[in-house]
Image (spheres, helix red, strand yellow):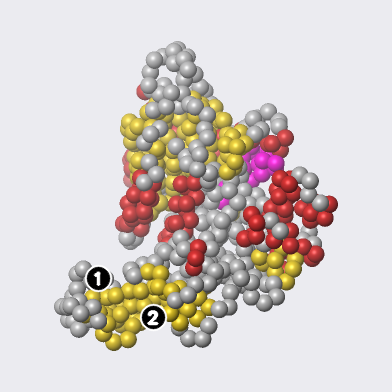
Amino acid sequence: MLSVIRVHLPSEIPIVGCELTPYVLVRRPDKTAATDDVPESSPLEGYFLRYRWFRVQSDKKVTICSVHPTEQATLQCVFCSKRPALVSKSYHCSPRCFTDAWQHHKTLHERAAAENGNSNEEDNELARANTAPPAVLSSLNGPTPFYPSSIAQKNGVGETLIEVGGCKTYTPTADDIGHVLKFECVVAVAESKQSVGHPSTIMTSRVIPAPSPRPRRLISVNGGDAMGGHLDQDGRIQSAGSFTVLSYNILSDTSASSDLYSYCPPWALSWPYRRQNLLREIVAYRADVVCLQEVQSDHFHEIFAPELDKHGYQALYKRKTNEVLSGSTTSAIDGCATFFRRDRFAHVKKYDVEFNKAAQSLTEVIIPPAQKRSALNRLVKDNIALIVVLEAKFGNQPADLSGKRQLICVANTHVNVQQELKDVKLWQVHTLLKGLEKIAASADIPMLVCGDFNTLPGSAPHSLLVYGKVDPQHPDLLVDPLGILRPQTKLTHQLPLVSAYSSFVRSVTGLGLEQHRRKMDLNTNEPLFTNCTRDFIGTHDYIFYTADTLMVESLLELLDEDGLRKDTALPSPEWSSSHIALLAEFRCMPRTRR
């Protein structure tokens, strides 16, 4: 006979919109243990598993802290409580919670005061305060009727059980916020539908709302908001002939270990939560071309490709080679994924770049036979690049003198992470650029080079990308045990590449751009950071473009201390990668006969 051995949930903290999938271990009639489902539609020797989900509603109502959603709120911001749009952001679990969040929280006050225009002087003082004033808080005495109650069967004193699901999985909704969920699994007879024995149950902690970070705006490099609002709006406002490109290292699940990111709550680091948060963020940007790094093979095929297909994207993928990761499960190896909107572009050609193959060819030519093994150990790191040639479907040139179709080449790469292998990083970047030069020589085509280069602004790889050469005296060139960088005069390329985000510095001065320049390193013309953890903060991610064929129209605003809370790093409940997304809007420059 079929029986349930045990059930449990990977995470006991349920989040709105994040599917809950219990682990159910059963003993089959042949006495073997298995986790396979036994649905009513396919019973096993006359038995099946019945599942039910309940919302446990208590007479005691609970208000959730807007900063720490796993904590109960004890205080409320008076300023926000008076404004319906800000009420959900008004609750805090302690005075320390409110104080730490003040720099971020006060922006809500500033915006509300600016929108009201004629607000009273007391409100203006609260909006301008640099430190959290005690007078802005009021205590929540007694239960606050913030969540609605319903009527159904009673489950003991002061509790009501409301059935909310009859499948093995359940996705919490806004109605569940603040309530405990109960999962029930029981063996049932297929013929009579009667239950056999007692059900196995799990009680979760209270459902919390999905954290919602402040939306990032698309900023015109001429000083205004390019989209007149946030990117998560329904309308897609974009000037005719322009297109947007997103680059984002999403942090693979295999890399998101609790040891590395111990500061991130376990529920926020779990893949079921991160995948839904990442998808929501990526879809909200509504980019025409999306370049993702650290996309696991199984996640690409099972999640990202099918989900983005629903939003009109075609997908291309290149998995990392697995010579170094030979002991890893193939499906868990990550790679680069490029998506493009089918209504904006058509696929023309795809090139896969495997740096391992280039390393094999290089060692055959310049490395003595006795040193080949050690040379390959240093050079073979499984990194790859994915190059895609697309044809634009939109009319982007009022006067196309050449009469040719508009092609665009997009390179998506993830360069080796080991910081001590400076020669390998530079060699990988140089190899990629030489491949792109060959494509450029065969076609008059704008180029974009996106990805996580794992190299800081001012490094040799960065210098090669933006200057087309490396200073012979650059300190990075001192690391070259194999002689692969010699002669150093070969470290050049002819592509006129420029970093898109340098437009924040190079553009005409405007009031709207000053706040964004403060997030830039004026010595390198790059963002202060694109990667932010407890152990590292700096820029590793870039979008480069050929300046003779493309011009930057607008850029996705960068995060700073207002976008990241004072007490956290990435990943966090709000942002599900250790990197931030970069996005640029481009316009193809009018063609001339060359």
Residue 144: which quarter of the image?
bottom right
Of 438 and 584, the residue lying toward us: 584
Image location of residue 453, percent across then percent down: 50, 44
Of 209 and 221, the residue lying toward us: 209
Image location of residue 353, percent across then percent down: 36, 40
Residue 27: which quarter of the image?
bottom left
Residue 241 seen in the current view: yes
Q: Residues within 10 Å of mark 2 (few under 14, many from 20)?
A: some
Of 503 and 277, the residue lying toward us: 277
Residue 465 seen in the current view: no
| Vertical placement of residue 10 versus 474, above or below | below
Judge from the rendering whether residue 526 lies leftward or rightward of residue 452; answer left or right.
right
- Residue assigned mark 1: 39
Q: Amino acid at mark 1?
A: Pro
Alpha-carbon span between mark 1 and mark 2: 18 Å
Q: Secondary structure at mark 1?
A: loop
Quarter holding the C terminus is top left
- Magenta span contains residue 519: yes
Q: Residue furthest right?
A: 121
Q: Amino acid at mark 2?
A: Thr
Which mark sits nearer the N-terminus, 1 or 2?
A: 1
Q: Looking at the image, which residue is at 52% across and 67% down? A: 177
Q: Looking at the image, which residue is at 27% across and 75% down? A: 49
Q: Secondary structure at mark 2?
A: strand
Q: Residue furthest front?
A: 151
Q: Which residues lie in the magenta part?
A: 515-531
| Residue 201, label in figure | 2
Q: Residues within 10 Å of mark 1 (few under 14, many from 20)?
A: some
Q: Looking at the image, which residue is at 43% across and 74% down? A: 162
Quarter holding the N terminus is bottom left
